[in-house]
Image (cartoon, helix red, strand yellow):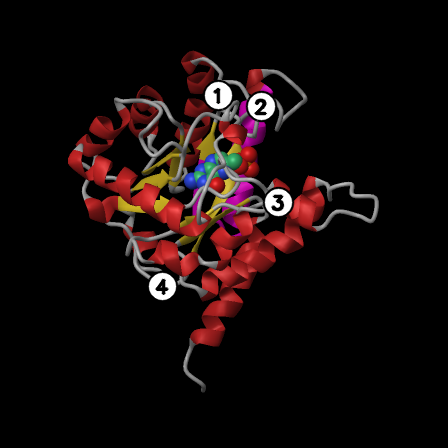
Amino acid sequence: MFHPIGLPTSLSSLERTLVMGVLNVTPDSFSDGGLFKETQTAIDHGRNMVANGADIVDIGGESTRPGSERISQDEELSRVIPVITALADDGIAVSIDTMRADVARESVAAGAVIINDISGGKADEDMLPFVATTDLPFILMHWRGHSNVMAELTDYNDVAADVAAELRVQVETAVRAGVERNRIVVDPGVGFAKTTQQNWPLIQELEVIDELELPVLWGVSRKKFLGELLADTTGEFREMSGREAATTALTTYFALAGAWAVRVHDVRASRDAIEVVERLGRDHA
Ligand code: PMM
C-alpha cells in the first residue's frame, strides 16, 4: 500500500485502502429541485458519509453516466463550489471530480485537496498544466472519449493489457506536462468505454494495472455490469440500490489486492469490509 504524495497527513498515515465517498451534485441525484435545497442536501450527505467512515468525499457536478450530455461550466461551478466550501471548512478531505481545468482551479481555491479527472487530462488541454502548478494528488482515469460516444469506443485486443498500456501513455503525457509522477493515482475506468463484460477481465487481471507501480483507485460502485450480473430470471437488471452487496464484495477483493482507494456510494459497508481485510492481514496474536 502506498500513497501519492501531496495527500493530507491524516490520510497518508493510514495503511489501509481508503474509502472515497461519492457525492454527485446533479439534479438527477437530488430530484426535489432548487439549487439551494440541492446544495444543503449534498452538504448533509457529505458529512454523513464522513460520519460513516469516508476518508475522502468526491464531489462532482456533471453526470458521466453512459450516454449523458455535458453541462455548462457555470452550471458545474454553481453546483460544486458551495458544497466544496462547506465540507472543506469542516476539515473534510475533498476531491473534485471534473474534466475542466477552470472548475478544478476554482475547486482547489475553495478547498479541494485532490483532483479527480475521469479523462486524465484528455478532455481539457489546460488541465495537466494546471495540475502541474499544484502540489496535489491527481487521479488519472483511463478514458477514450466523452460519455455520449464511449459506447462505440470498446475495441480491445486484451482489455487489461490495453487499458494498462493506454494508462501508461496518459501518465507519460501528464509527466511531460509537469505533473510529478508520484502525485498520480491511476484508475482503470470501470464502465468507461468498456462493455459490461469487458469490466470483468479488467478486474480479474488487476495485477496488470498494478505493474504501472502507481497507487490505484477502483470505481465500481452500483455500476451497470453489477446490475447485469445480478439480473433476475426475466433478464431485468438489478436496480441500483440492490447492487450494494456486490459492490462491497469487490471492495474486499480490491482491498486484499492492496488498492489505494475505492470510490463508493455506501461508505459504511466498504469501510467495514476494509477493516476486516486489515485485521486479517495483521500477525496472528
Ligand atoms: N465513475 C463515475 C464518476 N467519476 N471517477 C473516478 N476516478 N472513477 C470512476 O470510476 C468514476 C469517477 C461514474 O459513477 P457515478 O455516476 O456513480 O458517480
Q: Amino acid at mark 1?
A: Arg
Gap in angstroms between the C-alphas marked 4 and 3 = 30 Å
Q: Amino acid at mark 4?
A: Glu
Q: Tell me whether the residue at label 2 lies in contact with that at label 1, contact meaning CB atoms closer than 8 angstroms.
A: yes
Q: Nearer the viewer, residue 199 or 104?
A: 199
Gap in angstroms between the C-alphas marked 2 and 3 = 29 Å
Residue depth check, mark 2 versus mark 4: number of the one nearer the observer? 4
Q: Position of residue 129 (x, y in %)?
A: 20, 27
Q: Amino acid at mark 2?
A: Glu
Q: Residue furthest bottom?
A: 285
**Residue 15 shows which numbered tag?**
4
Q: Which residue is mark 2?
A: 38
Q: Nearer the viewer, residue 219 or 225?
A: 225
Q: Is residue 205 left or right of residue 269?
A: left
Question: SS at mark 2?
Answer: helix
Gap in angstroms between the C-alphas marked 2 and 4 = 35 Å
Q: Earlier in the sequence, mark 2 or mark 4?
A: 4
**Residue 225 shows which numbered tag?**
3
Give the crowd class for mark 3: few <14, some 14-19, many >=20 residues within 10 Å: many
Q: Which residue is mark 1?
A: 79
Residue depth check, mark 2 versus mark 3: number of the one nearer the observer? 3
Q: Tell me whether the residue at label 1 lies in contact with that at label 3, contact meaning CB atoms closer than 8 angstroms.
A: no
Q: Which residues are magenta?
A: 37-58
Give the crowd class for mark 2: few <14, some 14-19, many >=20 residues within 10 Å: many
Residue drawn at 64 percent across, 47 percent down: 226
Q: Earlier in the sequence, mark 4 or mark 1?
A: 4
Q: Position of residue 159 (x, y in %)?
A: 45, 47
Q: Amino acid at mark 3?
A: Phe
Placement of 277 over or under 122, stated as above or below: below
Question: SS at mark 1?
Answer: helix
Q: Earlier in the sequence, mark 4 or mark 3?
A: 4
Give the crowd class for mark 1: few <14, some 14-19, many >=20 residues within 10 Å: many
